[in-house]
Amino acid sequence: MMSIYQKNSLVVLSLILGFVLSIAYGYGFRNFIDQPSFSAKDIEYKMITEGIKSDNYNVSPLFKIRYRFELSRPYYFPERKNIVFVDIQGDKSERSFYKVDSLGNLVDSIRFRKDYSTIIFGAYILQNTAYSSWIIDGDTTSKNYIAYNADASWSEEKIEDEFDLLKQKAKDVFYFKYESLWDYNDPRKENKIDKAVFLIDGKWYALYGKNLYVNLDDLPDHKLTNLILGSSNFDKPNKIAYVADFQKLSRIRKNQWDGFAYINLFYKTDTI
């Protein structure tokens, strides 16, 4: 029979052997990673934390500190020289918006609660109940829509005529479908009353009616030109940034790796 000392020695040797094998496996696994071929030019890339300075440019991380919330892709407003982010973590019934200046300083914020349809549309924040011009003027008060047919009593013909009139005057049009518009026990939800909102001379007008989305088919698609591309697009040619090379370090999941990205940033005719 083995003594207690022999048993303990065997356990220790087993642990050491397991540790050595795990290191060997990790080393071997790293060697089997399909790595891209790196050119000598790759060593010219600087770490993003270092920043880049030249006679014409000064590139540095946007945030001076690491914020503790998860942010959306940035919305860029060049005429105001600021960027807006949306806090996308936690309960979707609450949305926080953060305004950052060109130096990476957090200059303002606003929070909306108990509304599942709070979005940025152009330079406005739209909700199903109200809208905000905070991005434009810093006003934190929510403004009511100027309502047409709020009691949903108009005839279908009158609704269609009013829709056409508002559409002709509007700079922008947005649409709320009844499913996300009313509370669960609201009769307007059961009656499928939709809501279309129209931006006219800096104010938003709301028209209520059934099946309003049918009237939106002929409207031009609204493109958020100020929404900056997500990082998932940077492996494709675009006018903002491009991942020229990527060095895999460790695998997170089937199609996701940790590693070093070598990024080309495009500005006018220059590549940084």
Image (spheres, rainbow, N blue to C red):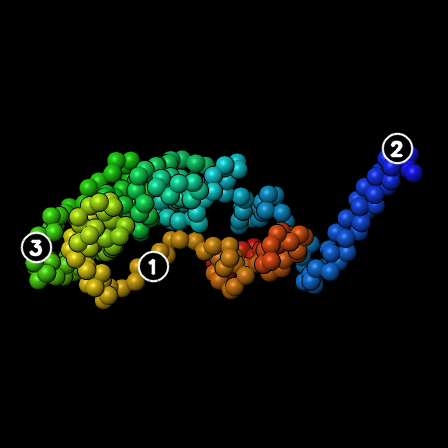
First in residue order: circle 3 vs circle 2: 2
Residue for badge 3:
154
**In the shown orientation, is residue 211 left or right of residue 257?**
left
Which is more N-terminal, label 1 or label 2? 2
Query: Does dot 3 land on a helix, a strand or a loop?
Result: loop
> Which percent across, then down, holds residue 256?
59, 55
Q: Which residue is mark 2?
A: 4
Residue at 88%, 32% in the rendered image: 4
Q: Which residue is mark 1?
A: 223
Dot 1: element? loop
Q: Is residue 200 visible?
A: no
Residue 170 percent location from the top left of the image: 19, 56
Asked whether 50 or 93 is in front, the reply is 93
Q: CA distance from mark 3 to mark 2?
A: 91 Å
User: Would you identify the image quadrant in which residue 99 lies?
Assistant: top left
Between 175 and 241, the residue placed more toward the observer is: 175
Disc nearest the viewer among 3 and 1: 3
Q: Which mark is residue 164?
A: none
Q: Amino acid under label 2?
A: Ile
User: Where residue 14 appears, x then y in whole percent?
Assistant: 83, 43
